[in-house]
Image: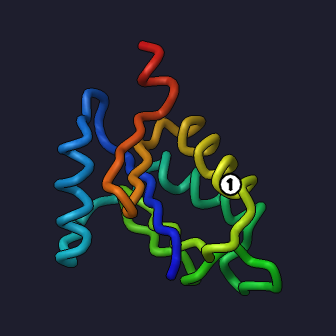
Amino acid sequence: MSFDLSVWALPDGATPEDVHAAVRRCREGRHGDRHPDPRVVAFYRAITATYPDRPVGPGTPWEVAPLHAAADHVELNLVPTCEDQVLLDIERLAGEHDLMLFDAQDGSVYPPPSRVAR
């Protein structure tokens, strides 16, 4: 069973409820027609530079590859045995790119540190 996280590019002022609504729309297959958010693109490039998803090599942290990337989010399905450093890198990069982090296991939403400090 994978450990699932996703990062979301939502407007300033977005709440955990906004993230939950976006997750529901994604699960229903509703992704809307829009250009990819530059924050999502930058996050995807940064995380896959360290942990490639194409091609997947030995020791990859990804349970599902390639990663599901949409205009406003990236879904990260991790192997249960992934190293803590992978999670720390995801959290750090989400903060650097002003993305909300959704933990699918318990439904928790974490705003990036930059939003918490405001």
- Is 28 placed above or below 112 here? below
- Is 110 placed above or below 66 here? above
Relative to 41, 62 lies left or right: right
Relative to 83, 21 lies left or right: left
Q: Residue at x 59, y 36 (%)?
A: 96
Q: Where on the picture, by quarter, is residue 27? A: bottom left
Relative to 59, 31 lies left or right: left
Q: Residue at x 18, y 72 (%)?
A: 30
Identify the residue at the far right of this view. Answer: 58
Mark 1 secondary-structure assignment: helix
- Is 67 placed above or below 105 here? below
Q: Residue at x 36, y 44 (%)?
A: 109
Residue wearing tag 1: 46
* Residue 3 image offset from top left, x and y in percent: 51, 69
Q: Residue at x 58, y 60 (%)?
A: 44
From the image, which quarter does the C terminus lie in?
Answer: top left
- Is 92 placed above or below 74 here? above
Circle 1: residue type: Ala
Relative to 96, 25 lies left or right: left
Q: Where on the picture, by quarter, is residue 64? A: bottom right
Crowding near the residue tagged with mark 1, few <14, some 14–19, many ≥20 C-alpha atoms within 10 Å: some
* Residue 110 image offset from top left, x and y in percent: 41, 39
Instruction: Pick whichever, 91 or 104, lies toward us.
Output: 104
Instruction: Pick whichever, 33 or 61, lies toward us.
Output: 61
Task: Give the tally of numbered discs.
Answer: 1
Instruction: Pick whichever, 24 or 2, lies toward us.
Output: 2
